[in-house]
């Protein structure tokens, strides 16, 4: 899994900034029972919260639970220490999810669903006797899957065979799987370049099924 170092550093900076906001609390009044009720500096909180909203928007998106939940608390902020603590807790949960790979897994699952649809279409083409476009679709899905695996293992994206070699070296899969992927890519390349007599229907079915299994393992 590859985390953006700039985002990771910004989360760390805003954690320190949020802690400073809470530490700057002051007593607003004391209850009849003698319990102090604290407020936090409104200007410092709003500056910090605006920074956090920007980070959550850029990292998770405006429709994410993290962004929406924090935004709701920001809008309801009345200056009390409890308000600040609640906002800080939401921020910490977002940071934990990011650094724990939640964001990557959600994107991977979404992409896997798209690839699964493409491979279902490839299976339908095979069933109708159109092995060549089916292999082209499978080749696209294969390359996209290797890019996701490269991200997961902190490797640079590149050409399919280069990623294939580097993923094997990184332990993403064994040498047998690497050779299999090379063979699938070769079939896909032949399909894309009109060399349709260089592979059989059986080769096409094996390729599509193999890529499906690879996507399912993400």
Image (cartoon, helix red, strand yellow):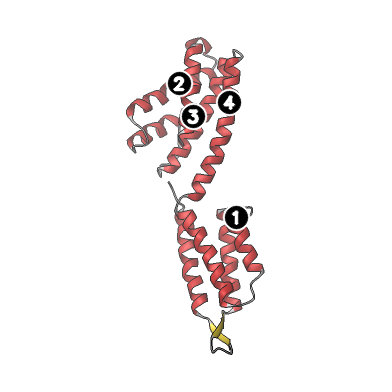
Query: Quick check: 207 above or below 48?
Result: above
| Foreground label between 3 and 1 | 1
Q: Which mark is residue 25?
A: none
Residue drawn at x 49%, y 50% as measured from the top left: 102
Measured Cα–Cα span from mark 3 to mark 1: 31 Å
Say left or right for 147 vs 78: left
3D distance between C-alphas at marks 2 and 4 = 21 Å
Q: Residues within 10 Å of mark 2 (few under 14, many from 20)?
A: some
Q: CA distance from mark 4 to mark 1?
A: 31 Å
On screen, 36 above or below 127? below
How far separated are the C-alphas under marks 2 and 1? Answer: 42 Å
Please provide percent x and percent y for residue 96: 47, 58
Query: Do the numbered discs 2 and 1 sit on residues whose CB atoms are within 8 Å?
Result: no
Residue 15 placed where, x, y %?
Answer: 48, 67
Secondary structure beneath label 2: helix
Q: Is residue 80 above or below residue 5?
A: below
Q: Residues within 10 Å of mark 4 (few under 14, many from 20)?
A: some
Q: Which residue is mark 1?
A: 65
- Asked whether disc 2 touches disc 4, contact meaning CB atoms under 8 Å apart, the reply is no
Do the numbered discs 3 and 4 sit on residues whose CB atoms are within 8 Å? no
SS class of the residue under badge 1?
helix
User: Which x, y percent locates residue 209?
Assistant: 49, 22
Which disc is residue 142 wearing? 3
Q: Nearer the viewer, residue 170 or 108?
A: 108
Separation of residues labelled 3 and 4 (CA atoms): 14 Å
Of labels 3 and 1, earlier in sequence is 1
From the viewer's perspective, is 184 left or right of 70?
A: left
Q: For mark 1, does the 10 Å Cα neighbourhood hold few (<14), some (14 to 19), or many (20 or more) residues?
A: few
Q: Nearer the viewer, mark 2 or mark 4?
A: 4
């Amino acid at each position: 899994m590859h985390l953006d170092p700039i985002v990771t550093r910004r989360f760390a900076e805003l954690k320190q900034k949020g802690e400073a906001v809470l530490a700057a609390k002051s007593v607003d009044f004391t209850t009849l029972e003698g319990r102090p009720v604290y407020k936090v500096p409104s200007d410092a909180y709003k500056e910090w919260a605006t920074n956090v909203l920007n980070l959550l928007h850029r990292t998770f998106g405006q429709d994410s639970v993290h962004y929406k939940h924090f935004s709701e608390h920001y809008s309801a902020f009345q200056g009390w220490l409890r308000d600040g603590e609640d906002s800080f807790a939401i921020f910490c949960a977002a940071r934990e999810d990011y650094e724990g790979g939640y964001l990557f897994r959600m994107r991977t699952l979404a992409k896997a669903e798209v690839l699964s649809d493409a491979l279902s279409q490839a299976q339908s083409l095979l069933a109708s006797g159109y092995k060549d476009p089916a292999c082209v679709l499978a080749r696209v899905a294969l390359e996209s899957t290797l890019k996701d695996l490269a991200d997961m293992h902190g490797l640079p994206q590149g050409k399919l065979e280069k990623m294939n070699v580097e993923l094997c070296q990184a332990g993403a899969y064994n040498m047998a799987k690497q050779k299999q992927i090379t063979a699938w890519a070769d079939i896909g390349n032949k399909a894309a370049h009109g060399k349709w007599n260089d592979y059989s229907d059986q080769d096409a079915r094996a390729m599509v099924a193999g890529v499906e299994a690879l996507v399912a393992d993400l």
